[in-house]
Image: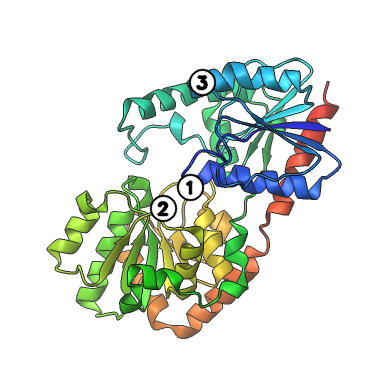
């Protein structure tokens, strides 16, 4: 089988969700299926040399000035030239027209871009606005035309079925994800390199959360719940908020300043995967009260490092967390604060959550994702 993959999200730095998914899936498929040929199509150079190499891997760097032009014209022409059997687009959209000899597969993470409401991120630039319009036009049409659509959770499958009409259920497949293998490396236990870099030793013990100005990530509610806890219950843990761009201008930081709690809350920029793994391993717990997620990879990151998780009882989170996480209503500050207080004051609960999390994490691995993905390819090739 000759498999073409749109790998351009891998080389788009900094690498984010779809890029992480793309990289780990590609590496796992190349490892698990050496009998197949892989054609990896990229727009920019693989500057950090993360894409796999081997006699069955062909990297095609094809520059283009605009994403739509590359995706709609250059990518399908390259796939036709390479005579691939399957062309897999990994980022919610794909070419509207491909050669009849090629089976098209598209991965749709979620369909938030087809929804409206307060929880949907509002485009802040013309580029972001054009991107959302492009996805809303191309993704439904491409999904209906494709031989198969892959998504990442049963929740997303239901969402896609609701928002993309006339999509045949038999063509919609679920392949769960995993997390970066670094989070599974027990040899990193106790690594405190990031502490010296960011002077975090003075903040131990601490509660960890991933911050963003995207309202669905719920960072402001995390901060408010924490401020409530230190005012009313005098917990010893501090709060570390990671990855919040422009946090100085955020409502979350303003709430910290108003409460005179700058010594108890530390905002950090985007950090390396290794440093993030260190934070998970040294945190008392991880709070992830997102209102909407197609999957929720951070839950598995925390599970693999032995960090107890509090997350939302909404969308895909219970599907991923199983019985290993503590669930709350993400709209309730009081419920979140009560759950945090319970975890920080009950050592036996933390031990139980750590053990259950480690066990739950073993159910998710990239090799399984790769095997399920290739099964989708094979099924598509069997169809006339």
Q: What residue does disc 1 label?
A: 293
Q: Is residue 174 left or right of residue 350?
A: right
Q: Is residue 287 left or right of residue 253?
A: right
- Is 132 rendered above or below residue 263? above
**Residue 102's spot in the image, x, y percent?**
76, 21
The number of discs equals 3
Q: Which mark is residue 290?
A: 2
Q: Residues within 10 Å of mark 2 (few under 14, many from 20)?
A: many
Q: Is residue 153 visible?
A: no
Q: Is residue 77 left or right of residue 286?
A: right
**Residue 347's spot in the image, x, y percent?**
46, 84
Q: Are marks 1 and 2 in contact (CB under 8 Å)?
A: yes
346 or 267, nearer to the observer: 267
Q: Which mark is residue 68?
A: 3
Q: Are marks 3 and 2 in contact (CB under 8 Å)?
A: no
Label 1 to label 3: alpha-carbon separation: 26 Å
Question: In the picture, residue 234 is in which quadrant?
Answer: bottom left
250 or 52, nearer to the observer: 52
């Amino acid at each position: 089988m000759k498999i073409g993959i749109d790998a351009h999200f891998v080389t788009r730095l900094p690498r984010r969700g779809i890029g992480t998914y793309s990289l780990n899936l590609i590496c796992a498929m190349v490892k698990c299926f050496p009998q197949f040929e892989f054609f990896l199509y990229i727009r920019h150079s693989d500057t950090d040399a993360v894409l796999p190499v081997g006699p069955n891997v062909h990297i095609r760097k094809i520059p283009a000035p605009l994403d739509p032009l590359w995706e709609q014209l250059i990518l399908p022409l390259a796939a036709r030239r390479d005579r691939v059997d399957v062309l897999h687009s990994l980022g919610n959209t794909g070419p509207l027209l491909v050669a009849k000899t090629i089976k098209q597969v598209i991965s749709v993470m979620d369909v938030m871009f087809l929804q409206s409401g307060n929880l949907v991120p509002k485009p802040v630039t013309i580029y972001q606005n054009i991107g959302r319009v492009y996805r809303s036009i191309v993704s439904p049409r491409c999904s209906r035309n494709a031989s198969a659509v892959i998504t990442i959770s049963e929740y997303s499958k239901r969402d896609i079925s609701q928002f993309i009409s006339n999509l045949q259920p038999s063509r919609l497949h679920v392949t769960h994800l995993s997390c970066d293998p670094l989070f599974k490396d027990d040899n990193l236990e106790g690594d405190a390199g990031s502490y010296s870099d960011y002077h975090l030793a003075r903040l131990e013990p601490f509660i960890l959360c991933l911050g963003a100005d995207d309202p669905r990530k719920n960072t402001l509610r995390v901060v408010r719940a924490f401020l409530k806890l230190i005012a009313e219950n005098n917990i010893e843990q501090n709060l570390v908020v990671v990855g919040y761009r422009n946090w100085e201008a955020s409502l979350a930081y303003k709430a910290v300043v108003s409460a005179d709690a700058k010594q108890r809350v530390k905002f950090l920029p985007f950090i390396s995967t290794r440093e993030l793994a260190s934070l998970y391993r040294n945190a008392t717990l991880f709070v992830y009260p997102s209102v909407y997620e197609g999957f929720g990879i951070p839950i598995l990151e925390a599970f693999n490092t032995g960090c107890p998780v509090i997350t939302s009882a909404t969308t895909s989170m219970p599907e991923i967390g199983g019985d290993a996480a503590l669930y709350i209503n993400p709209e309730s500050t009081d419920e979140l604060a009560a759950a945090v207080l319970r975890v920080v004051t009950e050592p036996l609960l933390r031990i139980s959550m750590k053990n259950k999390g480690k066990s739950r994490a073993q159910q998710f691995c990239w090799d399984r994702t790769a095997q399920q993905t290739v099964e989708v390819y094979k099924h598509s090739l069997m169809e006339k």
